[in-house]
Amino acid sequence: MINALKGMKDLLDKDAYYYEKIIKTSEEVAKNYGFSFINIPHLELYSLFKRSVGESSDIVGKEMYEFIDKGQNHVCMRPEGTAGVVRAYIEKKLDKTNALKRWFYHGSMFRYERPQKGRLREFHQFGVESFGNPSVYEDASIILMLVEIFSRLDINFKLLINSLGCLTCMQKYREKLVHFLDTQEGFCPDCLRRKNLNPIRVLDCKQEHCQHLLSNAPLLNQNLCLSCQNDFEILQKLLKENNIDFKIDAKLVRGLDYYSKTAFEFISNEIGAKAAIAGGGRYDRLIEHLDGKKGFGVGFAMGIERIMSILEQKKQVQSRSGIYLCALDQIYISKLFTIATKLRKTHQVILNYEAKKLAKHLENADKNNTEIFLCMGEKEAQNQSLFYKNLIKKEEKSIQIADLEKIL
Ligand code: HAM
């Protein structure tokens, strides 16, 4: 038997219901905030991620699904969506005019991680990217968008924010940090690698021992230039004015290299260890870094599977919907086939092509989570009617076929 690959899952039944619910809710909210749909390829040149997500990240360092294709191109299954969306923005020459664009996307991402609860090798994200807007109001706006999505899905979270500063503050901070790191001994090999590639990523190390060594490290948000400090204060003010609880996490640098200024993460305690259910921030330098014109970008992505597992724990069940149409004798099926075709212009209809006993049909209708049960037996066929049962209200009656659309 051929099984799905480790860390990759089929999505069906209640998982598919949760998935659709999350996407539909997120899309509705994103559209209210002025975002429209963009679809980008799953496969991109490896260099796109190497240059954006960055070599100091675990993603590029250890987790890429990369290979040489038949045309000898070094390609990679996308590990995240931002780099591809930025590539599209530049490729369509939108960077030339610093065009205002707000896009949302969703779909599979691929990271060769060690699979565990809430961590897959193929997982799904819903993400948004906003271009051309330097205002910190846009950063606040996308955070509020996530808050609204989680509120509609009835999901609790903790919001962590930080500011990584602009190039000016970051360069100065880097020097201070490297100086501090040089005075400490005993960092793990990952930290030593990152110290050379992108020292601020050392702050993100999950090892307790390294975190202990970092306890007196200089902090990013205490080394901001006046303008970044001002923006960070406005962000906090906007969140407070909109009644959003948050915590400043001075060591929050995110696992990808492209961020500057605002960085944030939404954490849930409901999937075992503290897990990020969404994360994002500003990446103004990335457009230029990928050979575009100097510009502005900010966005987030949420992990659909992590949110699905919270919804599952809350046992949010799918409400009954649609019609189950069936017959007690095979001779009525073709008539029901015509009725189903008409009803399907406006209703969801499951037609069972096999005649069965009433109890068996009712059991099937229940399994299919349908709301309305319609059945034709001998008596109904004679007087052009159907047996009707509402499986929510439990009411039963006989209805004339001619009146069907009116009643339904
Ligand atoms: P990220 O933090 O790498 O950010 O991923 C966003 C979310 O994807 C995480 O918070 C988590 O919920 C989910 N996720 C990540 N890895 C896995 C995995 N292996 N299995 C299941 N879920 C996972 C980004 O990807 C950035 N592109 C976000 C962004 C958009 N920043 C600006 N714009």
Image (tube, grey):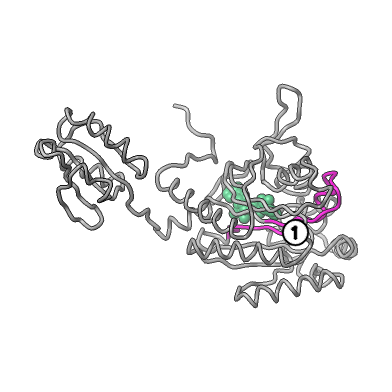
Residue 28 seen in this snapshot = yes
Most foreground residue, 402 or 225: 402
> Residue, x 55% and y 55% (percent of image)?
26
Most foreground residue, 164 or 377: 377
Q: Is residue 293 magenta?
A: yes
Q: Is residue 330 magenta?
A: no
Amino acid, disc 1: Arg
Quick check: 180 left or right of 100? right
> Residue, x 66% and y 37% (percent of image)?
41
Query: x%, y% of residue 168?
Result: 89, 63
> Residue, x 37% and y 55% (percent of image)?
317
> Residue, x 40% and y 48% (percent of image)?
14
Q: Which quadrant of the structure image shows residue 184?
A: bottom right
Q: Which residue is mark 1?
A: 282
Point out the image quarter for the N terminus.
top left
Q: Which residues are magenta?
A: 275-299
Query: x%, y% of residue 229?
Result: 81, 72
Looking at the image, which residue sits at the far top? 70
In this rendering, is residue 293 above or below 209? above
Graded by Cα atoms within 10 Å as few (under 14), some (14 to 19) or many (20 or more), the crowding at tag 1 reads: many
Residue 187 seen in this snapshot = no
Query: x%, y% of residue 247?
Result: 66, 72
Most foreground residue, 134 or 301: 134
In this rendering, is residue 230 above or below 360? below
Q: Which quadrant of the structure image shows residue 186?
A: bottom right
Quick check: 354 left or right of 106? left
